Image (spheres, rainbow, N blue to C red):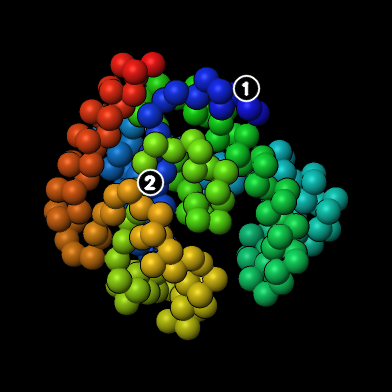
């Protein structure tokens, strides 16, 4: 693992933010500019798909109930259990976390974009990722706006969304680790203006880092 890190010289941005802040819209925009996106949620999904690399260990450690009839993680059952049971959540994390991290490093090595963007929703809780990042970019919006967005897209009640948010790091905690903040509280156009500026800055910083190496 360290061997990979020693020669890890690509300019990298960590993208994070709470639920409903707009991380997907932001990472999609950067992807459209040719930036190499490495998304821990996407990797986690692959690992827990039918015959995914994490399935056998999950079955062995947590039991058959966590695996559905297709041989994938039973997502709705797992979500319900881990939301209410901290011990099981930690055991599942202990299985997935190292596998996700290794996959991130592998994808980072193979990436060919002008710079890398790691999308890590749990960046505050997952400190080991920060050593890979030159900048941390936080997508931010007031809680009320985020609640409305999540309710709209997920058909969840306000109480359900608030319960999810209460388990996540707060806005304040996200802003504390940010090098840059994207304000995603108004229009798509307002967000795009900020994205264009950030992208230009990151391209320049990436050139500089490549030059220094």
The dot on residue 136 is 2
Q: Is residue 27 visible?
A: yes
In the displayed structure, 109 sits above or below 102; it is: above
Q: Quadrant of residue 134?
A: top left
Q: Is residue 108 left or right of residue 55?
A: left
Residue shown at the point (28%, 54%) measured from the top left: 181
Around disc 2, counting alpha carbons within 10 Å, would you say few (fewer than 14), some (14 to 19), or many (20 or more)?
many
Q: Position of residue 89 (x, y in %)?
A: 69, 63
The dot on residue 174 is none
Q: Secondary structure at mark 2?
A: strand
Q: Position of residue 30 (x, y in %)?
A: 30, 39
Distance CA(mark 1)–CA(mark 2): 23 Å
Residue shown at the point (31%, 61%) measured from the top left: 140
In the displayed structure, 41 sits above or below 104; it is: below
Residue shown at the point (43%, 64%) measured from the top left: 173
Q: Quadrant of residue 90?
A: bottom right
Check the image and name the residue furthest to the front: 212
Query: On the rendered image, what quadrant is the N terminus found in?
Result: top right
Q: Which residue is mark 1?
A: 3
In the displayed structure, 114 sits above or below 118; it is: above
């Amino acid at each position: 693992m360290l061997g990979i890190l020693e020669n890890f010289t690509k300019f990298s941005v960590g993208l994070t933010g709470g639920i409903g802040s707009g991380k997907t819209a932001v990472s999609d925009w950067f992807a459209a500019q040719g930036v190499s996106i490495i998304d821990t949620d996407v990797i986690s999904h692959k690992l827990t798909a039918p015959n995914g690399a994490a399935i056998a260990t999950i079955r062995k450690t947590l039991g058959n109930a966590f695996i559905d009839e297709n041989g994938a993680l039973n997502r709705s059952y797992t979500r319900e259990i881990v939301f209410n049971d901290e011990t099981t959540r930690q055991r599942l994390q202990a299985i997935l976390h190292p596998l996700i991290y290794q996959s991130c490093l592998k994808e980072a090595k193979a990436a060919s974009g002008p710079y890398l963007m790691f999308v890590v929703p749990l960046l505050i809780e997952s400190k080991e990722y920060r050593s890979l990042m030159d900048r941390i970019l936080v997508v931010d919006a007031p809680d009320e706006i985020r609640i409305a967005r999540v309710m709209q897209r997920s058909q969840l009640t306000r109480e359900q969304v608030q319960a999810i948010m209460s388990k996540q790091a707060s806005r304040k905690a996200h802003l504390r680790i940010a090098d840059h903040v994207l304000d995603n509280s108004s229009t798509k156009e307002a967000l795009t203006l900020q994205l264009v500026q950030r992208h230009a800055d990151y391209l320049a910083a990436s050139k500089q880092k490549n030059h220094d190496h």
